[in-house]
Image (cartoon, rainbow, N blue to C red):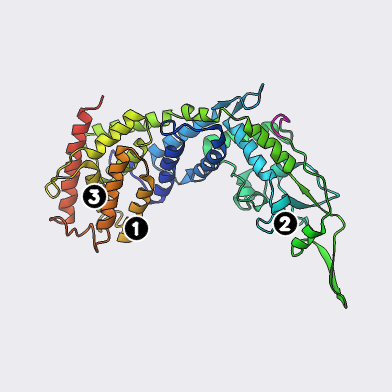
Amino acid sequence: MTTPTDPYVLAESELGAIGQFITFQRNYGPYLRQLAGSDYAGYCDDAARLDASYAQVQNASFRQWLDLYFDKLMTTPSDAVAGMSLVFPHLYIVYAFGKACYIDIIPGDGISDVGRHFPVRASTWTSDMWLTFAHGYASIDLGSDAFGPWAGNPANGGGYLNLQIYKDPGVPRRPTSPAWKQATDDILAGWGDNPPGTLVSRASGPIVRNDAYNRAFSYELPKYSWTDANGAHDIYDPDLGWSDGLAAAAFAQQILNGWTDFPKLQQTTADVWTAQLETAHALLRAPDLTAEDYFFLLHLLFALTTGDLPTRHLAETIAQTDAPSRALPNENFINQLIYLVLMMLADPFGSRAWPSPKLQQLIANLQGMAVGTDDASRLIQTGLDSFAKKLTVAGYPVQDPFVSGNLGDRQSDTLGALDAARKTIAANLT
């Protein structure tokens, strides 16, 4: 399919990532709630997840909005440390480093998760948590780089992409989306093995000997074993010791406690919502839209419900505008929009031909996104709930027992109703 509106087509493979972005907008955008300084941890974790799903987003508009968001985020300044010119990626690195220093080699073993100790060779351990962060943590038998570096190059086949640093899922990922990756690469290259001491405390804890730790990890640690009349005996490598990164983690936490201007990023990224509103206006004013374009508009409508008050009012106006068709003379825009999308996706002669279970999953996913308390979100919720029930009817919407007409006629009828309603809405735009 090649039409002038193809840039609005959404691929099935990107729907989850787009939904994640819209949910992120709802949780962290500038208009629905004011973030507190203490929200930085949840934000950093969710932003990292957004970064992880970036490559899945192929739609030109949503990719552009993501790029714009990350571009603005990378230049968001902070006064977290007096006298330093910091931006968001500096503090994200501090956050990741602090998490990595709070190391837990085997989560849930009952030993290391209490003291957060990890095994080292006393004769070669550098007592330097930054070098561990930057270059990886070798396995205790020195056989390999068992735990990949966060600060290393993720393109070299190792590192956190394949072996999450320290095997700890609590360590946020190194960014890979273009703007964030470049900003991170530039900072790390500038620091090298010598990050500023005002941001990073690199020393590890002292090396200790602890037989309880040794026994807890006995199946992994190098040892000599024998059995005699008194039972089994293990002698551990005398070079084996234990260290920790607790002091480095605590220093990072002090830096992050000073990140009180963290909520500033809500305002510096607000251009994304402006860009989405402009696209909504363009779609409403377009001479003609295809069913695929309306599928895009449905997702954009969710994004509009995260905007400022006038944008949310526009979303409400769109959702509730009358959109009568021959088959459904009393329906509003949102219900006709959902109906058209379902018919387009289910059409056995179309490019998608989704079966009923996939349609039901789509509606369930959209219901998970329609969680706002504004009037537009409630209208969307009501429409989705109604179609979730209709999809339990066998063959729906290819066969629709609730209205007359074959699938092709119903699609054309619904498309015409939406186009007419859209023109009414566009006529009142300012």
Kindly identify which residue carries mark 2. 111
Q: Mark 2 or mark 3: which comes first in sequence?
A: 2
Q: Is residue 231 left or right of residue 80?
A: right
Image mark for residue 339: 3
Circle 3: element type: helix
Q: Is residue 370 magenta?
A: no
- Picture coordinates of residue 94, whole percent (x, y): 65, 36
- Picture coordinates of residue 365, whole percent (x, y): 37, 51
Tell me if mark 2 has few (under 14), some (14-19) or many (20+) residues whose alpha carbon lies within 10 angstroms of its own. many
Q: Which residues are magenta?
A: 196-200
Tell me if mark 3 has few (under 14), some (14-19) or many (20+) residues whose alpha carbon lies within 10 angstroms of its own. some
Task: Quote the CA–CA distance across marks 2 and 3.
Answer: 56 Å
Kindly identify which residue carries mark 1. 358
Task: Quote the CA–CA distance across marks 3 and 1.
Answer: 15 Å
Front one among 361 and 367: 367
Q: Nearer the viewer, mark 2 or mark 1?
A: 2
Front one among 255 and 177: 255
Callout 1, which amino acid? Lys
Secondary structure mostly seen in magenta is: loop
